[in-house]
């Protein structure tokens, strides 16, 4: 019998990258499985061969470790031809065999077809939640989250995920409003990166009033704007023109320099970089800043016009990790294909303390 699939949400067009990554994770744990990824659907199904390996996969998966997925859950039932006058009863019926959850997400995909279900999912959430609560399927004490993913109005997948290792956001999407004064829409990318990739402690430590930042490839200033909003003094490096209002804040110094050769005289608290360049060159530059002690926090984009995007990102991250290990530096990193990212992923590296040998 075919096992129930694991479901991974991704940006439409990135299904094969998401599938390659999930396959690599399964391989790491020596769990045999295969992906079913159809182009532009906005999700990947991943099947393991038996119940024991599925359970093991469920235990090790963590959304923070998956670059190309925004959300995931283990689907325990697929319901097709739901009666349109009572979709709730069949879902409750299978719900008994799924899990008790602390909360419920009624989700849709980010594809064209998926987005058409947005209103429907919103409307359906309250009655389904109430019905599930009445059946005892929702309970404060649970460590799980229930998911009902609608593929069509009469077709859904029902499953669950661990609260701590999946997203509390519907379909894993953090919707942000463009700030009124932001010089560019790409400002939202850094805002999302800060909220998704940095813990609250890291944000407090790095992005506090009076701290310093450098923005490589800064013009017109969308990323610099985010740092300025958080009270930082920023050096913006770019030959292009910076936004006038941003420059009037007196928190920005604009240098028309080559960002691949410029280095700060004193270390800065945070480095950000959004240059449209070969990913390996950006990775090399980030490694230079981190190993040289020029910053402790680096947030940057890797632009991915190539076909094998997962492999390219993995190679770039390996390059930085190898360089930091060679320099005896310990570090933390996380990377994500964010909702506001397009043909790129955003990466965060933080240096911890110097590794001491014992
Ligand atoms: C995608 S834009 C940055 C947008 C910016 N993050 C924002 O939110 O407004 C990339 C910028 O990198 C700059 N750039 C590319 N190569 C550079 C280099 N070697 N040195 C400095 N700036 C560079 C370009 O001039 C361009 O303004």
Image (spheres, grey):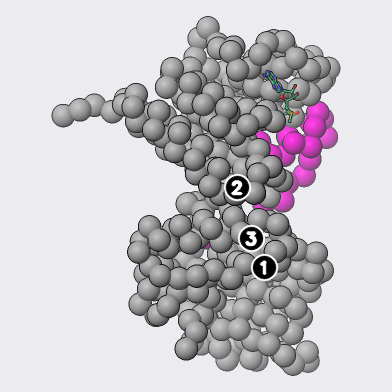
Q: Determine which residue is flagged by label 3.
A: 15
Q: Determine the CA span between mark 1 and mark 2.
A: 16 Å
Say if the magenta span includes residue 192.
Answer: yes
Q: Determine which residue is flagged by label 1.
A: 38
Please report contact status of discs 1 and 3: CB closer than 8 Å, yes or no: yes
* Sequence-first disc among 3 and 2: 3
Please report contact status of discs 3 and 2: CB closer than 8 Å, yes or no: no
Looking at the image, residue 14 sits to the left or right of residue 287; the answer is: right
* Sequence-first disc among 1 and 2: 1
Estimate how packed mark 2 is, as few (under 14), some (14 to 19) or many (20 or more) residues with alpha carbons within 10 Å.
Answer: many
* Sequence-first disc among 1 and 3: 3
Quadrant of res 113: bottom right
Percent position of residue 317, x then y: 48, 38
Magenta: predominant secondary structure element?
A: loop
Q: Determine which residue is flagged by label 2.
A: 309
Please report contact status of discs 1 and 2: CB closer than 8 Å, yes or no: no
Note whether residue 290 is visible: yes
Q: Secondary structure at mark 2?
A: helix
Residue 291 position (above or below residue 23): above
Quadrant of ligand 1: it is top right
Q: Secondary structure at mark 3?
A: helix
Please state the extent of the stretch shown in magenta in the rendering: 165-193
Q: Determine the CA span between mark 3 and mark 2.
A: 11 Å
Estimate how packed mark 1 is, as few (under 14), some (14 to 19) or many (20 or more) residues with alpha carbons within 10 Å.
Answer: some
- The residue sitting at the top extreme is 265
Q: Is mark 2 within 8 Å of ligand 1?
A: no
């Amino acid at each position: 019998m075919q096992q129930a699939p694991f479901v991974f949400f991704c940006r439409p067009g990135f299904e094969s990258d998401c599938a390659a990554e999930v396959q690599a994770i399964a391989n790491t744990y020596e769990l045999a499985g295969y992906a079913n990824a159809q182009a532009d659907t906005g999700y990947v199904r991943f099947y393991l061969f038996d119940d024991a390996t599925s359970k093991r996969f469920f235990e090790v998966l963590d959304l923070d470790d998956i670059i190309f997925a925004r959300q995931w859950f283990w689907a325990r039932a697929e319901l097709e031809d739901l009666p349109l006058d009572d979709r709730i009863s069949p879902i409750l019926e299978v719900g008994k065999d799924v899990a008790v959850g602390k909360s419920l997400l009624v989700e849709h995909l980010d594809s064209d077809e998926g987005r058409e279900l947005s209103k429907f999912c919103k409307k359906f959430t309250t009655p389904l939640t109430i019905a599930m609560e009445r059946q005892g399927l929702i309970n404060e004490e649970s460590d799980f989250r229930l998911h009902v993913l609608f593929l069509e109005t009469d077709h859904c997948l029902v499953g669950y995920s661990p609260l701590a290792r999946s997203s509390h956001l519907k379909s894993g999407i953090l919707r942000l409003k463009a700030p009124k004064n932001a010089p560019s829409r790409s400002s939202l990318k850094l805002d999302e990166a800060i909220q998704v990739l940095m813990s609250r402690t890291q944000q407090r430590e790095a992005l506090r009033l009076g701290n310093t930042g450098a923005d490589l490839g800064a013009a017109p200033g969308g990323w610099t704007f985010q740092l300025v909003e958080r009270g930082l003094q920023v050096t913006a490096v770019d030959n292009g023109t910076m936004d006038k209002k941003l420059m009037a804040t007196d928190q920005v110094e604009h240098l028309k320099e080559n960002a691949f050769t410029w280095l700060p005289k004193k270390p800065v608290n945070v480095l950000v970089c959004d240059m449209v360049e070969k990913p390996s060159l950006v990775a090399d530059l980030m490694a230079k800043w981190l190993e040289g002690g020029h910053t402790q926090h680096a947030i940057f984009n890797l632009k991915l016009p190539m076909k094998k995007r997962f492999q390219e990102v993995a190679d770039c991250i390996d390059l930085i990790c190898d360089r930091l290990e060679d320099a005896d530096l310990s570090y933390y990193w996380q990377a994500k294909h964010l909702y506001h990212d397009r043909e790129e992923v955003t990466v965060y590296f933080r240096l911890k303390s110097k590794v001491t040998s014992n």
